[in-house]
Amino acid sequence: MAEGALRGAGNRPNMLVRYPDGIEGEFFYQKRAPKSRPPWIEVVELRFPSGRAADEVVPRDAATLAWLSNLACLELHPHPVRAEDLEHPDELRVDLDPVPGVQWPQVREVATVAHSALDDLKLVGWPKTSGKRGLHINVRIEPRWSFDEVRRAALALAREVERRAPKLATSKWWKEERHGVFVDYNQNAKDRTVAAAYSVRPTPQATVSAPLSWDEVPDCEPADFTLVTMPKRFKKLGDRHAGIDDKPGSIEPLLELFEKQGLGDAPWPPHYRKQAGEPRRVQPSKRKFPLIEIGRAQHKEDALAGLERWKKRHPKAAAHLEPADVLVDSMRGRYTTWTRIRVNLQHVPEELRPAQEPLDPDEKIRSSS
């Protein structure tokens, strides 16, 4: 599988996601290459928006992939740049992320809309399952633009997909404003990464982020692509993304579209400096939505257990909640993720809305790096 895995993550700095105690145990994100490593493991220094820097692993051969596997690294998260040019992305990434309650067929439908939009903009998209609930589309581009410009192009594409399918897709950054499938343009901000093609995900079925051809998208199912099935598929079909590097495209049409849309910038993720033209980073919930926080926990199941306790205390309010009203946020800490759960009470009659209570659970979480 090395040929395909290296096409997805090779020649790039990678963040590692390691599961030394298996998928049921603790896992952690590792930006910095282990200090104890063979001399033939290549690294490159990457600088982050925080001002910090780290030497990240650059896999270029099957031996490096085997070494990473031996570290219990299931997922490789490559940056969208080559090690030889760290400031100019050669890939625009479309991350289709369904909100709670949205089913997989809608994700596939939005992917088809995005495909059509990319075709009209003379860009080639290469789809793959995320290995979980979403779908990614990678677009190879000429390495001529900055991270900010590529993010702006991705934002224009997200808004165009929303315009074409307003009932199915959204480009809204704030979770309480989203519906359907979120087209996550912020995955193109510097230091943001997604799981590479052929990464194994921490699911009981060992699902894999699987490259697809467009004619497979309408009928594909994430469960079809696992640690067991992928070698057979690769042997029979090869890498579905084998031609991804053949025709890198231009984002000029997207940048022109951004100007025509006339909507300006959209919010950036936390911890990024305030950008010129960016709207105020004020959650809509603080302006108009009745949002309360339920709990924070290192483990998602503990946070969800707190939500169930809240529902038992407030059954009348819970009966009015819609799936998208429960906001389960995966927050990245220094070495791992933690979970925050909030509830939007917009569909709960005012007389039934519970007040903010002490968090349950309320675990102390280490701040992000």
Image (cartoon, rainbow, N blue to C red):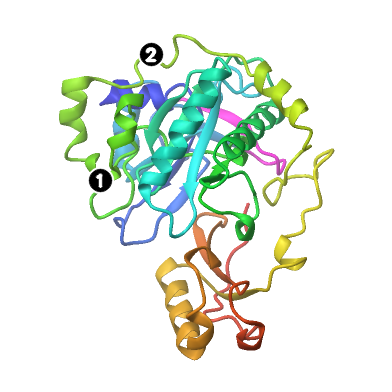
Question: Which amino acid, mark 2?
Answer: Gly
Number of the label disc, if any, that sits on residue 106: none
Number of the label disc, if any, that sits on residue 243: 2
Query: Which residue in the protein does label 1 denote?
Result: 223
Secondary structure type for disc 2:
loop
* Quadrant of residue 184 within the rendered picture: top right
Q: Mark yes or no: residue 277 visible.
A: yes
Q: Mark yes or no: residue 76 visible.
A: no
Q: Is residue 29 magenta?
A: no
User: Residue placed at 47% from the left, 73% from the top?
Assistant: 303
Eyeballing the image, is 256 above or below 47? above
Furthest-top residue in this view: 246
Q: Is residue 44 magenta?
A: yes
> How busy is the neighbourhood of tag 1: few (under 14 within 10 Å), some, or many (20 plus)?
some
User: Residue placed at 34% from the left, 16% from the top?
Assistant: 242
From the viewer's side, name the closer residue of 199 and 263: 263
From the viewer's side, name the closer residue of 138 and 352: 352
> How busy is the neighbourhood of tag 2: few (under 14 within 10 Å), some, or many (20 plus)?
few
Q: Is residue 296 left or right of residue 282?
A: left
Disc on the earlier residue, 2 or 1: 1
* Quadrant of residue 148 within the rendered picture: top right
User: Residue placed at 50% from the left, 31% from the top?
Assistant: 114
Part of the protein shown in magenta: 40-53
Eyeballing the image, is 92 above or below 104? above
Query: Where residue 244 sits: x, y (%)?
Result: 42, 17
Query: Where residue 254 sits: x, y (%)?
Result: 66, 23
Report the quarter where the N terminus lies.
top left
